[in-house]
Amino acid sequence: MRPDLRTLTFTLAIMLMLGWLFRVGQVVLLPVLIAIISLYVLASATNAMARLPIIGLLPAALRRIIALLVFTVAVVALFVYVIDTFAKVVMALPRYEENLDLLIVNTAALIGIDDRASWSSFYGATIGRLELQSIVPLLLSSLRGFGGTLFLVVLYAAFLMSERLHLATKLAIALDDPDRQTRTIELLERINERVGEYLSVKTLVNLILGAISYVIMLFLGIEFALFWAILIGLLNYIPYIGSMIGVIFPVLLSLAQFGSVSMGAAVLVALSAAQIFVAGYLEPRMMSRAFNLSPFVILLALAFWGALWGVSGAVLAVPLTATLVIILAEIEATRPIAIMLSGSGKV
C-alpha cells in the first residue's frame, strides 16, 4: 500500500472511530463539553469582577467561588423555572387547542372553504389527529435527562475550575524544561484568552438578544415570555437556523394564545427586527477580533454535531468549531488549516 494511501486510510479510520465514540459517549461527553464552555465564561466573569469597585478588591480565589455560586444558582433556577413552565403549559393545552381550532375554521371560511362538513373531515384527518396530551410523557422524560445534564455540568465545572489552578505546576513537572514550559504556558494563555473572549462575548450577545425579545413579548402579552426569551438566547448559538427556530416558537404560541393571524404577524416582525439588530449591528461591534467561519464549515459542523447529539449538538456546533479554529490558529504548524476553515482567511 502506498504511503499516502495508507495515511488517508488511517485518517479515515480514526475519524470513523472518533465519530462512533462521540455517538456512544454522548451521555458522558456532552456535560463535559458544556462544562468546559461554561468554565471559559466563568473565567471571563471572574476577570470582569476584578474591575468592579468593591468586588475587585477580593482575592481571585474568592471571586471564582462567587462566579461558580452564581452559575450554580442560575442553573438551579433555570431548571425550576422550566418545570414550572411545563406544568402551566400542560394546563393551558385545552385552551390552545380550542383557539387553534377556531383560527383554522375562520381562516378556511375566509379563503372560501364554506363546506363545513368537508373541512371538518379534513381537519379530523390531519391536525385533529395531533393529540397534544400524548406529548406530555415524552417531555417529562426529556426534562429528567435535562436535569441530570445540568447537575453534571455544575459538578464538572466546579472540579475543572479547581484543576485549572494547578495547571502551571503540573506543566512544570511534566515538561521539565524551562524554555518549553514558558512557550507552552504562553500558547495556552493566548488560546484561553481568545476562546474566553469569543465565548463570553457570544454569551453576552445572546443574553442581550434574550432580554430584548423578553421585553417585546412582554409588551405584546405573550404567555411564558421569559421561557421563550431563554430559548431564543440559547438557539442564537446556532447560526442561520437557530434564529428562525427561535422566532417560530413564539409566533406559533401567539396564534394558539390569541387565535389571531395579525397578532402572529406582529410577533414575527418584532422578533425578527430584534434578531436583525443584534446579528447585523450589535454583535460585529462587540467582537474585537474576527472569529469568522466559512459558511460551508458552519453548515458542515451543524450537520455533524446535530446528527451526533441532536439539538444539543447543534447548539454546541459553532462554539466548538470556533474554539477549534482559534486553537489551530495559535499553533504555527496548524495555522494553514485554520485559515482554510475561516471565512475570509483572517484568523
Image (tube, rainbow, N blue to C red):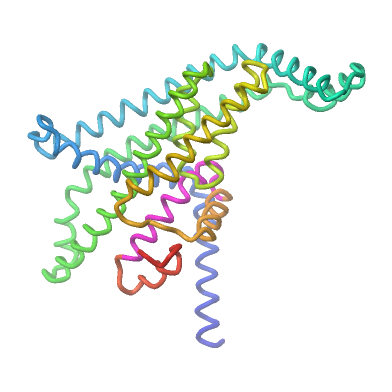
Residue 107 in which image quadrant: top right
Figure check: 14 above or below 258: below
Figure check: 166 above or below 57: below
Q: In front: 8, or 334?
A: 334
Place of residue 328 in the rendered image (x, y in percent of width and height, measured from the top left) = 35, 65
**Left or right: 120 in relation to 42:** right
Q: In front: 41, or 101?
A: 101
- Asked whether residue 309 is drawn in magenta, I would say yes
Place of residue 118 in the rendered image (x, y in percent of width and height, measured from the top left) = 92, 21
Which residue lies most toward the left here?
57
**Left or right: 53 in relation to 99:** left
- What segment carries the magenta color? 308-329
Residue 264 in which image quadrant: top right
**Left or right: 196 in relation to 61:** right
| Residue under the point 34% across and 38% down | 204
Which residue lies most toward the bottom here?
2
For the image shown, how many numbered marks are present on the structure?
Answer: 0
| Residue under the point 31% across and 25% down | 73
Figure check: 147 above or below 165: above
| Residue under the point 43% across and 56% down | 321
Q: Main secondary structure of the magenta part?
A: helix
Look at the image and tell me in which quarter the N terminus lies.
Answer: bottom right
Place of residue 288 in the rendered image (x, y in percent of width and height, measured from the top left) = 29, 52
